[in-house]
Amino acid sequence: MNRAHNFNAGPAALPTEVLETAQKELLNFNDTGMSVMELSHRSTDYEEVHNEAITLVKDLLEVPEDYEVLLLQGGASLQFSMIPMNFLEKGKAANYILTGSWSEKALKEAKYFGETKIGASSKDSNYKHIPALSDLDVSEEDAYVHITSNNTIFGTQWQDLNVASEVPVIADMSSDILSRPIPVDKFSLIYAGAQKNLGPSGVTLVIIKKDLLSNKKEDIPTLLRYTTHAEKNSLYHTPPTFAIYMLNQVLRWVKDNGGAAGMASRNKEKASLLYEVIDQSDGFYTGHADTNSRSLMNVTFNLPTDELNKQFLDEAKKAGFIGLNGHRSVGGCRASIYNAVSLESVKALQEFMISFRDKHQ
């Protein structure tokens, strides 16, 4: 069977080796005579998978000992509510740096729980760039500062993650987690839906500093408290066992392929192939993001006319390239080249882009 060139923005491509392992083990995991989906989450066989996944996250991201790693449900979108619910204190403001649609949604949810502010925004330029660190309005009176490290819709990414602050810094890293080494110790909380770089949808990774957990409000439902999950090793209730099994398999694959540094090298090579085509096309392809804010995960671009955009997407789909449609807010095209997207697929897209330009320029 021929595999598609999968450039979907999420759920996204998974490593072929991981899918093959899951296929092989689907009916009989670890000689249990059952699928991992059928195992009790209290069984030794499942707990080994669960604990290995947490250990691999700690190792691959060099998570300091004063952090907890949680495996939660509800997607990154539930974190938009859980964070202010747990950490937005009266008399303080939650500070959101707006760099795209997902940071806007996070801000919207925070407003239900208390005072908010916008510490910087690139909305006026249709989110073409990441604000400079020197332009951030951060105060000791902020409850926390929230950033979105990569913006799938607009194709921008924070190049410098050293967001210095006297207050907790929280990051939504759903679309670039483990795509490069990150300074975990610069953040009090990192969260990421798995369905782009870590595995299938269904599990959300949270890395949280233990001193943040000491902030215990009394009026939060049990399941929405971070302490609930930290105290029970993310096993307070039935976890998404198959999603965590797949997460563990992807983490093993990342480790076997050079870890976070290996992913960074791989992703830079892939992104450079596509940005080269854009930059050398004499304006036939126009990137949405400013050069110094470009994402290594989502390459966004437009052709000279809407008609050519449509023709490009139609011909690309017929040629086996899936998921290249840009988001409606920016239009055009988007190639999401997360960790598992192969270099071969990106090279094939590069050749297709060159060929299409040569025919229509």
Image (cartoon, rainbow, N blue to C red):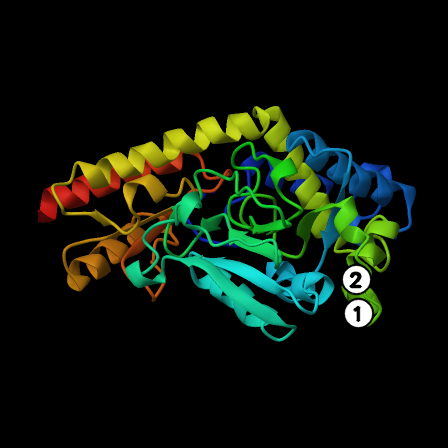
Q: Say which residue label 1 marks.
A: 220
Q: Say which residue label 2 marks.
A: 225
Question: Where's residue 24, x and y in %?
Answer: 69, 39
Question: Where's residue 201, x and y in %?
Answer: 61, 55
- Relative to 50, 296 lies left or right: left
Residue 307 appears in the picture as rendered: yes
Number of other residues with Cα within 10 Å of mark 1, as a class: few under 14, some 14 to 19, many 20 or more: few
- Relative to 44, 37 lies left or right: left
Residue reaching furthest left? 361
Tell me the residue at 10%/45% (across/down). Answer: 359
Amino acid, disc 2? Arg
Amino acid, disc 1? Ile
Q: Is residue 293 above or below residue 202?
A: above
Tell me the residue at 60%/65% (across/down). Answer: 93
- The total of numbered circles placed on residues is 2
Work out whether residue 239 or residue 141 is closer to the camera in this orientation and state it.
141
